[in-house]
Image: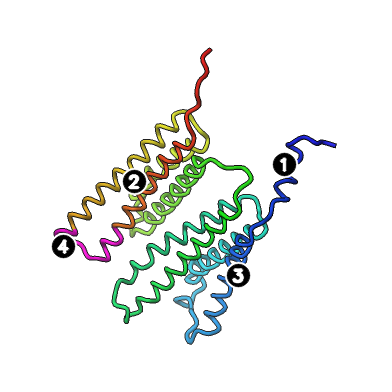
């Protein structure tokens, strides 16, 4: 019988108490989208219909809805069952909900009697759901602390993938399907993916790349903030537009600080003298 610490590690991890908040958050994520969809069809006076009568017109919208349902359900089941990587999936969905909650009110900045409260309530619910997932995740800390540098690198790769997909879709949606329109976004996506891969795999010079990228985001945020203050002082921007600019500026500066902070959490190894 193997009594080594490595052999007893899985049993020790499995014997750790599970957080009730994580289980509840997983159940809510797995069940809430289906309950909302059922309520939409059951209680709506005009159930949603796909535009057009052809099946091809309904495929994109149906794929988006099914993708959302699959994403929420899989993340909820992963949290309930504690599948491998459930912390990453829960954190990604939580921050996505918070980001959507911050951006959603910009779609309707009109008076409250024109339907504005619907976006406010929806944004508040999504934001609170994201915060609840993050709080529940912290209630059950990991058995082994993970490196924040890896998290930042993975996040950069995800952003790069989104930029690449957006650039390709934009280029294909043009009347002449001009491929040159996807070049700037593709170059930016390649740079972010390269920097993220260097941070994940700890390639040589990753600290230089991460530090340069972090300071670029911070400098961009400072210049955007100064430009926003100038526009507000000269009444050249509306309140809704200023709110959007402030959110983008804040996120850019916070992301740059996150990169630098993660880099400092993993100090440079001290080389021993020969």
Q: Earlier in the sequence, mark 3 or mark 2?
A: 3
Residue at image coords 65%, 60%: 80
- Marker disc for residue 184: 2
Front position in the image: 269 or 155: 269
Residue designated by label 4: 235
Residue 27 percent across, percent down from the top left: 62, 66
Residue designated by label 3: 31
Residue 45 percent across, percent down from the top left: 48, 87
Q: Earlier in the sequence, mark 3 or mark 1?
A: 1
| Drawn side of residue 212 relative to residue 144, left or right | left
Looking at the figure, which quarter contains the N terminus?
A: top right
Residue designated by label 1: 9
| Residue 47 sits inside the magenta stretch | no
Residue at image coords 39%, 72%: 119
Secondary structure under tag 2 reads helix
Q: CA distance from mark 3 to mark 2?
A: 41 Å
Q: Earlier in the sequence, mark 3 or mark 4?
A: 3
Determine whether label 4 and label 2 are within 8 Å by CB: no
- Which of label 3 and label 1 is nearer to you? 1
Q: Residue furthest left?
A: 234
Q: Is residue 256 above or below residue 17?
A: above
Q: CA distance from mark 2 to mark 1?
A: 48 Å
Q: Earlier in the sequence, mark 1 or mark 4?
A: 1
Q: Residue furthest top?
A: 274
Residue at image coords 52%, 18%: 272
Q: Is residue 183 above or below residue 42?
A: above
Determine whether label 3 and label 4 are within 8 Å by CB: no
Front position in the image: 58 or 88: 88
């Amino acid at each position: 019988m193997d009594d080594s610490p490595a052999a007893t590690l899985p049993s020790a991890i499995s014997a750790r108490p599970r957080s009730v908040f994580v289980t509840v958050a997983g159940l809510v994520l797995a069940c809430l989208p289906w309950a909302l969809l059922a309520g939409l069809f059951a209680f709506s006076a005009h159930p949603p219909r796909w535009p057009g009568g052809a099946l091809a017109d309904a495929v994109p919208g149906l794929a988006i809805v099914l993708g959302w349902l699959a994403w929420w359900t899989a993340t909820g089941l992963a949290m309930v069952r504690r599948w491998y990587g459930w912390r990453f999936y829960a954190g990604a969905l939580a921050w996505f909900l918070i980001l959507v909650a911050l951006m959603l009110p910009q779609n309707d900045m009109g008076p409250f009697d024109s339907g504005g409260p619907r976006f406010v309530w929806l944004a508040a619910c999504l934001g609170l759901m994201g915060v609840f997932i993050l709080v529940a995740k912290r209630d059950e800390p990991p058995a082994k602390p993970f490196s924040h540098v890896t998290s930042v690198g993975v996040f950069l790769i995800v952003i790069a993938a989104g930029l690449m997909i957006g650039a390709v879709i934009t280029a294909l949606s043009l009347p002449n399907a001009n491929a040159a329109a996807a070049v700037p976004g593709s170059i930016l996506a390649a740079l972010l993916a390269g920097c993220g891969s260097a941070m994940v795999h700890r390639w040589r010079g990753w600290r230089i790349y991460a530090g340069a990228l972090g300071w670029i985001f911070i400098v961009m945020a400072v210049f955007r903030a100064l430009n926003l203050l100038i526009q507000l002082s000269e009444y050249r921007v509306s309140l809704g537009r200023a709110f959007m600019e402030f959110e983008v500026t804040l996120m850019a500066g916070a992301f740059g600080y996150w990169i630098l902070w993660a880099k400092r959490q993993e100090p440079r190894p001290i080389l021993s003298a020969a």
